[in-house]
Amino acid sequence: MKNLFVLIIMMQGAFLCHTGATAQQANRLFFQDQSDLKEISGPRFIEGIEIRGGENQNFSSAQPVTASLYTAGTVKPILSDKGTTAIESAQRLQFKYAIILDREVEKISNLSLFAFIDEWWGTRYRYGGTTKKGIDCSALTSFLYRDVYGNNLPRTARMQYQVCQKIHISESVEGDLLFFNTRGGISHVAVYLGDGYFVHSSTNQGVVISHINDPYYQKRFLGAGRPMPETESFQDVLKCEE
């Protein structure tokens, strides 16, 4: 059975590369008649809910999207114990998150980002936590920015909001921040992954990927922001934490 599963995965990967189909489409083709694999499960997201900007969302005019912030930190190769590029690990990450995000495998290109997510995946939520024993939402975003993009963020969600250029959700790109009101004011933050998906430390599920169309997050969504570390206000906020 194990060999059969490996063969199916290899065939599915080849199908994705040659046809350009999404991972979800490939799953339907390869798994629909495999009764032994019918128990395979993954994240479930609520679909078909249209996002409408609320009247109380006062976004400033967004500047043209630039890649300076997100390319400043060189994407780190995934290395094996011997110091060589672990191609198998990279392919595993690409395939896994192509399925979760329902996108083509080749579009999972920032391996440093998804390696970080994979490392923290499932870590439980703990208010004020900063370790694998428990981490809160703003600690996760600050660690992600430090390790993936090579930039520092303030410690709290409210302070992270203060150093962001406010943008509309439709203008958000991978690496932008999303802010929510979960217990009064700006009290939750996540990192946007594109196509409505974001990674965050959820109070109920820990570090997980969710979708903006989930009614819980849609109702509590406050806005999106793009950190601007080169600004004086950003440095002032960091100094306040020292």
Image (cartoon, grey):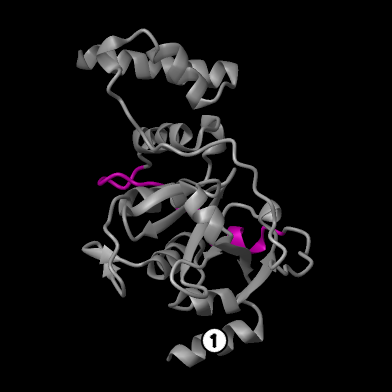
Task: Find the magenta span and give its range.
Answer: 66-84
In the rendered structure, does residue 149 fall within the stretch colored magenta? no
Question: Which residue: 48% across, 53% down?
Answer: 216
Residue 183 in view (yes/no): yes
* In the depicted structure, whether residue 171 falls above or below residue 37: below
Question: Which residue: 43% across, 48% down?
Answer: 209
- In percent of width and height, residue 173 lies at 63, 53
Q: How many marks?
A: 1
Q: Is residue 74 left or right of residue 2?
A: right
- In percent of width and height, residue 223 lies at 62, 64
Mark 1 crowd level (few <14, some 14–19, many ≥20, 10 Å Cα)? some
* In the depicted structure, whether residue 24 falls above or below residue 213: above
Q: Amino acid at mark 1?
A: Val
Which is more toward the observer, 41 or 118? 41
Which is more toward the observer, 164 or 65? 164
Q: Quadrant of the N terminus?
A: top left
Residue 153 in view (yes/no): no
| Overall secondary structure of the magenta section | loop
- In percent of width and height, residue 126 lies at 28, 67
Q: Is residue 17 left or right of residue 199?
A: right
In the rendered structure, does residue 68 fall within the stretch colored magenta? yes
Which is more toward the observer, 100 or 75? 100
Q: Secondary structure at mark 1?
A: helix
Where is mark 1, residue-wise? 237
Q: Find the residue positioned furthest to the top.
A: 33
